[in-house]
Amino acid sequence: MISSALNLAAGSLKAQQKAMDVVANNMANVNTPGYSRQSSQMSSAIPVQQGGLNFGRGVQLSNISRTVDPIINQAMLKNNGQQGYWQNLQTGLTNVETSFGSLQNTGLSAAIDDFFAATQQMANAPQDVAQKINVSSKSVALATRLSDMSRQLTSAQTQSDVKITQDITSVNQLLDQVGALNTQILKAEGASQGVVGAANDLRDQRDQAIRDISKFMPVQQVKVNNGGVLLQSMGGDLLVQDNVVNHLARSTNLAANGFQDVVIASTQQTVAGITQSGTIGGSIALRDDRLGGYLTKLDSIAVNLAFGINQANASGVGSTQASTITSGQGVLNQALPVNDVAQKNPFSAQMVVPGSFTIHAYDSAGTPLIPASQATISVTATSTMASIATAISGSGLGVTASVDVGGRLVMNAGVNKMGFANDTSNFLATYQINNIFQGTNAATMQVSAAVQADAGLIATGKIDAVTSSIQVGDNQSALQMMNLQNAAVSFDGSNSVSLSARTSTLSTIYGNDVALATQQTSFHTAEASSLMQQRQALSGVNVDEELVNMIKYQRSYEASAKIIQTSNQMLSTLMGLIR
């Protein structure tokens, strides 16, 4: 019996020592991210029967368990993704704030207001060349503002796309880590002969890796019976199964938006559900929905402004006339009609209609030529740039026209000069002839070199349809330009809205997007803090509790040692009797 007591005490010493090791491990990992507090679970050893009586065999450490709450863990996975999504959006939107203007930086609305204020001043004094120079200056400032804003937004798109690639690299590293941990966990728990929780530290590392993945993309995990984890995208794409890992990659082909989709590397299939949350989803939303949407609206402002102003200028006349004119835009295919959509001109199919325009010819002093001072050029549904050039050359005005290698219309009046009027076909404005603005979108927006060199080419009035005479005090074209600011128009197929409304709408949408991203970021950051506190309260290491456990196991160890000491004394007494 003394021998049994010694064995019982020795077993207790071992159990208490192992429990003390668990406490020490907890204390060592008090600041380790993702570590879950471990608890020693003691149980009575299977008793032994002697003489019809059951004698206990002491205590044993039956299990070391992690303290985790799967509900909190799942909530953290979901919130991590949302927090990453909105933080990415907020950061990206804040980075382009200067593009929209601030108190220290003049914005697009101010540039448009300044331009139209200059056109109003020009309309009030059409004969004043200084007012035309002012319009030219404000036109350059506006075009520069539009093109700079477009380049800034496009650059932000590119940066967002680069971040997607960087995040994919991080996700792939974490997926490899999960796969490797699956293998280590299976190996450790298989070698432990069925002891549940033998790989607690590895399981913590795997849970933390999955939480880290959820910051980049939404994932769902499925636990399997062998202790492994099957990881999928929200759309069901397999990412990790045991030690098999499917990496993410960029598609080898460009999508319709000009960027590469996020795909499963081995299959090139687009990852389903990746846009729902996570920093990758946030970058995609920033790149395509927000920045892409702003660029679309900005381009609409630019092309409607350019066409409207050019339409007024094309059929108008300024204080000077040109001897040579080259269209700002050319045709992509000279064999096709000028109104064919294949010309890739934003207005060719939308605005060019059967009609005509009039060319007026003047001598070097600006006097209408006699006897032929004007000619009407017809534009039909089948007119090509070459046929229009032929019609101009054959008009009898002494103006020769041709099409250069870039598909542009080139007109030359020699020593004479020319002017235009009554364009009912919209051909002149579409191909930017006798124009102020050039370009097909905000990025390419600029003021024509001819106007920058001579502001007198900016139209203020109209040419008399009968006499071809020019009145220096006429302000019809200037008024047409001025009224464009608040007139509901659409030259690009969008809804008819004024330029002022288009600009304010763009600024309002941006402001609302920033406010929403800021609000959502604050909410999910607060939720993340709350969930972390809940996890720490349940799974975190409490130093005070561990100290109490340490004392408890220490006292149990001392009690077991006392049993050994007492048993030893009893054995010594018994041996003394024998001697």
Image (cartoon, rainbow, N blue to C red):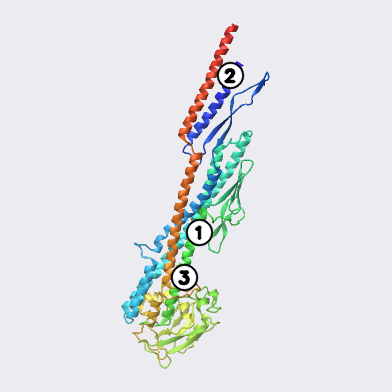
> Which amino acid does the dot numbered 1 rest on?
Ala
Disc 3 marks a residue whose amino acid type is: Ser
Disc 3: which residue: 300
Q: Where does residue 269 sit, x and y in percent of width and height?
A: 60, 56
The image's mark for residue 285 is 1
Q: Position of residue 328 (x, y in %)?
A: 45, 76
Residue that protrudes farthest toward the right in the picture: 52
Q: Is residue 435 above or below residue 560?
A: below
Marks 1 and 3, how far apart in space? 21 Å
Between the C-alphas of marks 1 and 2, the distance is: 70 Å
Mark 3 / mark 2, whichever is N-terminal:
2
Question: Along the polypeptide, which appears first: circle 1 or circle 2?
Answer: 2
**Residue 75 in picture, x, y percent from top left:** 53, 47
Front position among marks 1 and 2: 2
Residue 90 seen anywhere in this rendered image of the structure: no
Q: Which residue is mark 2?
A: 6
- Disc 2 element: helix
**Quadrant assignment for the N terminus:** top right
